[in-house]
Image (cartoon, rainbow, N blue to C red):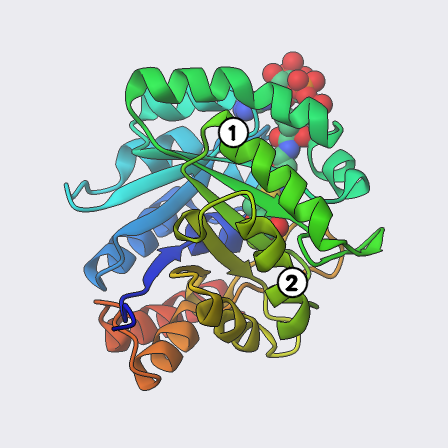
């Protein structure tokens, strides 16, 4: 029997709000996170402990991480680029960490001011801190299908970075379509190549939704056995260092589509849709 359970990782508070033109007040961020928890989300990427010079929208990371109303069943994760971010995230109470690199050298430099290899070297002390604190680490691979600077990315390039992140100790690898231009065919090739190095059970799909194409990519990945997908409530988001990067696949859209197709998400779709309307209204988007 095919396993019908799908896990959704909510990345709106981080991937969504990092791209807002203005600073979203900390209290509003906390309200959003608490509403998402109420809607049943059990993995929530709450903030990013990145340099506030690079992403000022996430400058209140410590207050956000320390301020969420904790529930033992919920893992509140933090995106971190280096040891400094990891140490601060752990001090603030993160339940999980996520590191990020890319399958494109140019994007890696634009986003983190270093090459892919340098980035992975920076993750070593992050992994050591996480291990000491007993926290799992996810590894994102940006531009896994297309890069805004280098164009189409070869599946082997994604697979190579995935293998390095997995060897480093990442428990999950999020294959990410940063600019949302991937197709189901190329999604399939990227996941197939990656699954030759990393177990399918350790892969996740992170799709931005440029032209309503993200669900087709989810479908392609589901067919291969991927069971973890990211969503951002309200379809918020983008990446400040990927010009034209659109919003993420909306969590409410993802959940409604999965449930209709007979997948179990264990989420309250109506509450998520309500939260999506509420945050879009508050942000005037
Ligand atoms: P850098 O300028 O090369 O590094 O930035 P640095 O070590 O010279 O640090 C510069 C300043 O930042 C220093 O402060 C550091 O202390 C400080 P100063 O001495 O000048 O006062 N700093 C920090 N502060 C707080 N927390 C930290 C931290 N690290 C350094 N962790 C760096 C390198 C990686 C730090 C920078 O490029 C950076 O923070 N980049 C983050 C970019 C980012 O957040 N992009 C969006 C998230 S990724 C994404 O959206 C894609 C994803 O969704 C998947 C997908 O869709 O593709 C995940
Ligand atoms: Mg993203």
In the rendered image, is residue 209 in sight?
yes
Q: Quadrant of ligand 1?
A: top right
Can you name the residue that lies furthest to the left here? 72
Position of residue 121 relative to residue 212, above or below, is above
Position of residue 267 relative to residue 75, above or below, is below
Q: Nearer the viewer, residue 185 or 90?
A: 185
Q: Residue 227 appears in which quarter of the rendering?
A: bottom left
- Please report the residue visible at 50 percent of the width from the left and 34 percent of the height from the top: 166
Q: Is residue 238 left or right of residue 166?
A: right
Dot 2, crowdedness within 10 Å: few (<14), some or many (≥20)?
some
Dot 1, crowdedness within 10 Å: few (<14), some or many (≥20)?
few
Instruction: Provide the secondary structure element on which disc 1 rests.
Output: helix
Give the residue at mark 2: 189
Q: Nearer the viewer, residue 58 or 189?
A: 189
In the rendered image, is residue 183 in sight?
no
Dividing the image into 4 quarters, which one contains the C terminus? bottom right
- Please report the residue visible at 66 percent of the width from the left and 53 percent of the height from the top: 144
Can you name the residue that lies furthest to the right here? 150
Give the residue at mark 1: 167
The residues bearing labels 1 and 2 have C-alpha atoms spaced at a distance of 21 Å
Name the N-terminal-most of marks 1 and 2.
1
- Please report the residue visible at 52 percent of the width from the left and 29 percent of the height from the top: 167
- Please report the residue visible at 54 percent of the width from the left and 63 percent of the height from the top: 248
Instruction: Provide the secondary structure element on which disc 2 rests.
Output: helix
Numbered tag placed on residue 180 in the rendering: none
Q: Position of residue 82 (x, y in %)?
A: 56, 23
Q: Position of residue 81 (x, y in %)?
A: 57, 29
């Amino acid at each position: 029997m095919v396993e019908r359970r799908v896990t959704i990782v909510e990345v709106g508070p981080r991937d969504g709000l990092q791209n807002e033109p203005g600073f979203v007040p900390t209290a509003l961020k906390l309200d959003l996170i608490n509403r998402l928890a109420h809607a049943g989300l059990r993995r929530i990427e709450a903030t990013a402990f990145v340099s506030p010079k690079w992403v000022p929208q996430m400058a209140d990371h410590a207050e956000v991480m320390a301020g969420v109303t904790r529930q033992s069943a919920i893992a509140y994760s933090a995106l971190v680029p280096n040891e400094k971010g990891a140490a601060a995230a752990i001090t603030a109470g993160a339940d999980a960490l996520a590191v990020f690199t890319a399958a494109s050298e140019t994007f890696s430099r634009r986003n983190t001011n270093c090459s892919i290899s340098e980035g992975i070297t920076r993750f070593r002390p992050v992994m050591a801190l996480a291990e000491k604190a007993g926290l799992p680490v996810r590894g994102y691979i940006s531009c896994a299908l297309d890069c805004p600077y280098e164009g189409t990315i070869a599946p082997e390039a994604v697979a190579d970075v995935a293998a390095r992140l997995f060897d480093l100790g990442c428990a999950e690898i999020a294959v990410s379509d940063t600019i949302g231009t991937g197709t189901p065919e190329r999604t399939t090739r990227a996941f197939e190549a990656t699954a030759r190095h990393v177990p399918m059970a350790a892969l996740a799909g992170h799709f931005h939704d440029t032209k309503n194409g993200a669900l087709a990519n989810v479908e392609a990945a589901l067919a291969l056995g991927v069971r973890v997908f990211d969503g951002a409530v309200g379809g918020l988001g983008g990446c400040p260092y990927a010009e034209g990067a659109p919003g993420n696949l909306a969590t409410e859209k993802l959940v409604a589509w999965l449930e209709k197709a007979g997948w179990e998400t264990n989420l309250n779709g109506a509450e998520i849709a309500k939260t999506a309307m509420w945050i879009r209204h508050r942000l005037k988007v």
